[in-house]
Amino acid sequence: MFKSILLLLSFFFCLTTAAQPGSAQEIRIGLIDTFDPDFYLGTFVPTMEHLQHTLKDNKISVVEIDPHSLLSDIEEKKPHFLLSSAGSFVTLINSKGAQQIATVRRSHALSADEAVSSVFITRKDRTDIRSIEDLKDKVVTATDSKDFDGYLLALGEVAKRGFNPDSFFKRTLFTNYQYPDVSTYIKVGEADAGILGPCQLEDLVRDGIVKADEFRVLDPKRGPGRCLRSTEMYPDAVFFSLDGAPSGAVKAVTLSLLSMPKRDGGFEWVPAGGFLKVFDLMKDLKLGPYAHLRETTVKAFVMEYRTEFALAAALLFALIIHIIRVNVLVNRRTNELRFALAAQRATERRAQRNREKLDRLEKSRVISQMSSIFAHEVKQPITNMIYYSSGLKLLLSQLGIKDSRVSHALEQLCVQARRTSDIVEHVRSYAKHTANRSGSFELTEIVERAVSSIRSDERHEADIRVEMPRSCEARGDSFEIELVILNLLKNAVKAAESENQPQVEVLVEDQRDRWLVAVSDNGPEISDERFAKLGKPTKSDKQEGLGIGLSIAVEIIENHGAHLNFQKRTPHGLIVSFNLNKPETEL
């Protein structure tokens, strides 16, 4: 490093003495010494040559800034511009008003803001070290403690993995760009691993200093071009102005750098972003603008948690305002609550009456169908009794047997049989609901009434979801279809109530000339044996959420020319569906 500095000082001595004293405005450019020697000859010197050539009317002088006494050197030497790493740049944004002019972009980098990174290396025979985590309490070696695109990026990677970078390594050996270097320390066993900057390992192999298979990269990531890396990529070197730099000089230097042609070494100066990740890195390491986080004073504590303190103060202020507001509005809210409770009780009473009404309707329908079956079965035997009585009377007449008592008995038997037939027919005519299955009705209204009735029942917590068109006109008996849907909903709610989040879904879907109506739940899994018995009148199964009215529902749907279909739901639950014809569908 010392030889490089002497070379630079000699070079810039030539530059500064080339201008005529007193005939040009001085432009002081500071160089923060955190770079490797190749940077000075490959990047810094060509940049200064270009500035000297394009800014001939200005006197360009260079001052060296020690990174260990950064702020005091700036105060003493008062440079107008600085050339440094991205870490030093973000450090000086708030304290010295640093403003980016341009950032180095090299040909092997993806962009100027994703250009530099660090790499962890160890000897290939160190089988005990496979990842960065294995370096805990190990000895490592690096070039310099202020080396941004080397040591600091490596510490940032350690912090990202949840470790304290200040105590992660047992010891760190710094070479300060002298011999023994990083690779030598590792070779002789003085260090367990080393930290190099971007592409430095590949350069060592290219120059024949180390063998290609001598070292292994820890947690390798393929970087841009041929280089491996172990960390994220960050912006390259930054040329920036400081607060107080003459505006004319800032303009001239900016135009000069941005117009600088791409060098043979493969770099150019361009505007760049990506500095937010540098701020995050410095915060993780508690360096630069976040150096106060290392302090233990009350001021440091307040500075570290200033955002939290501000949020707490805002929360406290909002809480006070809320308490005042609540105290002012409490009487009004109390009255509104009384009215709301009264309205809720009225709604509950109406819902209870609706549930009772629907229960009565369903029971009436069940009784009606049972009565119809009974009347149908009894009418035929009674009719046969009348026929037999008439046949006996005719037979006695043909045989010439005249017995007033037998004739009277047969006559009374016929009278009573006809009377019984009339009663059965009357019951049948009462019980036989003449369904208008050829009429049409609005299916959405039927579904909404059934769902509303179930939702008003507070005895369950099922989430009932409905998906159907705004209007869907169907053909059939609306009364019977409503009973079916209501029955299926009750069964689904009963089945799902054992789940932590009971859910019931009602779907009405257009299928050309028919409507598909499906009711599903997320109840427990149904065994194959019980599934085979669904819809059969032999046995009900309330444990699976099926009520005693399911067999009646099957009959009603079949009377409408369709079938009640059952399907297991994945991962558990049941789907019950049926079809209804549209009014324009031909019978």
Image (spheres, helix red, strand yellow):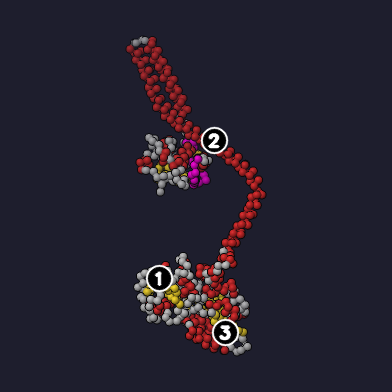
Say which of 405 and 12 sits in front.
Answer: 12
Amino acid identity at mark 3: Ser
- For the residues labelled 2 and 1, the Cα–Cα distance comes to 75 Å
Q: Mark 2 points at which residue?
A: 353
Front of the two marks 1 and 3: 1
Question: Which sits earlier in the primary sequence, circle 1 or circle 3?
Answer: 3
Question: Which sits earlier in the primary sequence, circle 3 or circle 2?
Answer: 3
Say which of 54 and 417 sits in front.
Answer: 54
- For the residues labelled 1 and 3, the Cα–Cα distance comes to 43 Å
For residue 256, say whether it is visible: no
Quarter that holds the C terminus: top left
Where does the magenta region start and end?
459-481
Q: Which residue is drawn at 49% across and 36% down?
A: 479
What is the x, y in percent for residue 126?
Answer: 36, 72
- Binning the other alpha carbons within 10 Å of mark 3 as few (below 14), some (14 to 19) or many (20 upward) gives some
Q: Name the residue under label 3.
A: 61
Q: Residue at x 59, y 75 (%)?
A: 96
In this rendering, is residue 417 above or below 563? Answer: above
- Check disc 3 and report its element: helix, strand or loop: strand
Q: Name the residue under label 1.
A: 218
- Tag 1–tag 3 contact (CB < 8 Å): no
Q: Tell me, yes or no, whether the highlighted magenta stretch contains residue 464.
A: yes
- Check disc 2 and report its element: helix, strand or loop: helix
Q: Tell me, yes or no, whether the highlighted magenta stretch contains residue 544.
A: no
Q: Which residue is drawn at 38% across and 78% down?
A: 188
- Binning the other alpha carbons within 10 Å of mark 1 as few (below 14), some (14 to 19) or many (20 upward) gives many
Question: Which sits earlier in the primary sequence, circle 2 or circle 1?
Answer: 1
- Check disc 1 and report its element: helix, strand or loop: loop
What is the x, y in percent for residue 160?
Answer: 47, 66
